[in-house]
Amino acid sequence: MITENGTAATAAQPGRVPAILSALVVVASGVFILRLVLAYLGILPPINAGNPDLSAPGLIPAILVHIGIGCLLFGGVLGTGLSAVSLIPARLRLTRFDLLMVAPIAGLCLWIILCLMVRLLDGGSLTILAIALGVIAIRGRHIPAMLTGQRYYRANWTGEPVAPASASINPRTMLITAIMAIAFASNYGLLWRLPSAIPNGTLGLGDMAFFTGAYHSMKLGLNPFLALTIEGESFHPFNQTPQLLALGFDAIPGFEISLYMSTAVSLFFFLTMAFLIATLCHYRRSIGQPALNAGTLVVLVLLLCASTRYPSWIVETPPYAFGAPLALSIIYLIERGRQRTGFLIASLPLSVIAFGVTKVMVLPVIGCYAACNLCYKSWKDKSKWALLGLAIGGGLALTLAVILVAVFWRKFTSFATPEDIGPYSLHKLYYHLAKGTKFIKTMRKALPSLSMDIALVWVLFAVWRLRNIALFLSVLLGASLCFIYAYVFGPTAPTSFLLVFAWLLISARESTFNQTGAMRHLGIAAALALYSFLGRDVGRWEVTFVWAIPIATMAFTILKNVLDTSESPQPSKPKLHAWQYAVSMAAVLSIFAHATGELRLGWDDRRPVSPRLYDLWVKVRELTPANALIFTDQTGESVDRLVGWNDFSMTAERQFYISSWSTSALRGDKVARASRLEANAAVIKGDRQPQDLRLKRSYDVYFAAVRADRSVPVTFKPIYNNGEYAIYQIP
């Protein structure tokens, strides 16, 4: 292998998973499998038998449908992106790694534009799929060349051509990655699906109810993009990518929006991350960087697993499932900018665009890293182009910031509280100590939050030891913003871990780690973050394993496969990979056990929502005209997800006078909220006429969707009654 000095690189074998650790994983997987089998046979009770049984007939087929949709989403976005970048002229001398890493950004942007244009022209999802697949078919002959590296220029750090690194990933690695992806997405879908035609859905993740509700609003129209829960308000265009892309698949038989969000989007995240990690590994080999040993690979895996606020966040906030992979692409462009300034110039504007359409709060960390590198480039090389890129990117970032402030300032300032400012662990400690809780019990309750805060400080200390100022300033900004106002800037913390992971994978040399001891500190910081997940996840501690085991298995398998650069490796013995097969078998069985009730995750007070409530909103959609205004008693002052924060009501796809105020300006305006709720109740009682209210839009007819046992005026015309809920037309 050729290095930047033209000499052969020493192949520092990554080393195999330590035998004792491999044996422990095999034993743990075996015990888990045996426990599931005994529960299935009825010899032992289900795991977490005290938890409610959320299994239901038809779950496995529904999950498989959405696994297929997730594969179609991944293949469609990546294929469209590869088709687009294949049009780049060969004279630009881009490497295949450049094309592969940029393809997800290009594909996602094209899909967003396609979904917007087709829906604005009243087209359907079949039209979107036909156009996307048509583009892939036209340019498809170029994709294998990009994936294998044929006919594409390769260069090392000096710009001299080098021998191509093998682009192959062995079948075992691909099989294990596929199994882990399916287990990852399936278990999240089974755990967090919302009420639907399949019974026993729950509302454990409230934000997910908002995102699925926004999809129902999009189906009615993108201009205006109405907030169906509050008459007179509209939704903002930010963080709407998952529901917008759902418009490209909702004609597929069996499509269900919450399973799409929890299963298909999770699968897209997993597969795209696996694809980009594998590409980065091949890139590292192609530029002559030395291999990494097993200890370093373990730290990389820990950092990747720590790149989330908590394990269920990938489902609760699905825009991050699109933002995280794009972050890897942007970081690659920044690092490539060391050889070709054009990549660095493009990185900051692309950051604003990429995270503006996915997860906005990923931008501060990645944007800061791009800006710091642009500043250094313009200062060191006196590059006017770098200065121009900094000016354009900075202008775009400033414009986006102004727009965000204009859209969200009034809302966030209206309901911000002192508890939102500062490290959350300090508020937790103060709260319990003020209540008179004993110190040891207080520490036990605050320890998960405290460990996350310590992890952020520790990773900052570790990065300082790496002597990379741009990396340090970016992580410092991410940690600082998270500490100052975690309610808004919480995503900057996991993005900091993701940035460090990508930088290490692309640029790191173990000699640097050995001199500074940074790798040991990075491992401690990531381990502290993972420990915090055990007590901070909105599910229970078991959900940390739903997240970490598939991610870790996928990442270590790919890193080990690609970065093992031995010219003549010893033949692999089956026992050396036994842990991978054991984990894969346990993952597959966990899906069936979860779907049939032998494995019950989540908390013990979690209860399924009545299927008759879902039926109510479906019947509102079916039995009322599009321009109807709905009044409901399924709201109130409480922050319960079926009361004041009832985003699930948007399933009806009709405008409510008020059903949820969780994302409304009313959340911080108690007087206006009370007035709106009072007027809503008065209409249902018959004390006020809907026509007498101050409405922002005009409506043809008015309806009430209420509990069946609620007393309503005799003038209300019965439309539907399922025994628990009823619909009336208001005269």
Image: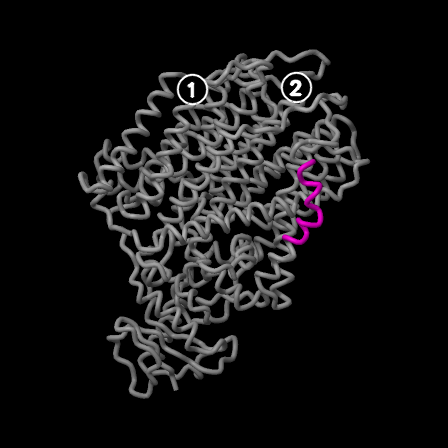
- Overall secondary structure of the magenta section: helix
Residue at 51 percent across and 23 percent down: it is 560
Q: Could you say which is closer to the camera, residue 47 or residue 151?
A: 151
Provide the residue designation for mark 2: 288
| Image quadrant occupied by the C terminus | bottom left
The three-letter code of the residue at mark 2 reads Gly
- What range of the chain is rendered magenta? 133-145
User: Is residue 10 shown above or below 270?
Assistant: above
Of callouts 1 and 2, the N-terminal one: 2
Q: How is the image coloured?
A: one colour
Residue 297 in the image: state x and y as whole percent: 49, 22
Neighbour class for label 1 at 10 Å: few (<14), some, many (≥20)? some
Q: Is any atom of residue 483 visible in this view?
A: no
Give yes or no for residue 139 being in the magenta stretch. yes
| Above or below, comparing residue 389 to residue 726 in the picture | above
Q: Residue at x 29, y 81 (%)?
A: 712
The type of residue carrying mark 1 is: Leu
Report x, y in % for residue 89: 79, 40
Q: Position of residue 138 (x, y in %)?
A: 71, 50
The N terminus lies in quadrant: top right
Instruction: Pick whichever, 141 or 603, lies toward us.
Output: 141
**699 to the left or right of 689:** right
Residue 10 is labelled as none
Q: Nearer the viewer, mark 1 or mark 2?
A: 1
The kind of secondary structure element at disc 1 is helix
292 to the left or right of 65: right
Mark sitting on residue 576: 1
> At 52% across and 45% down in the image, what residue appears?
268
Give coordinates of residue 109: x percent, y percent: 64, 50
Which residue lies at the image location 50% right of the left edge and 67% below the top edge?
A: 233
Helix, strand or loop for disc 2:
loop
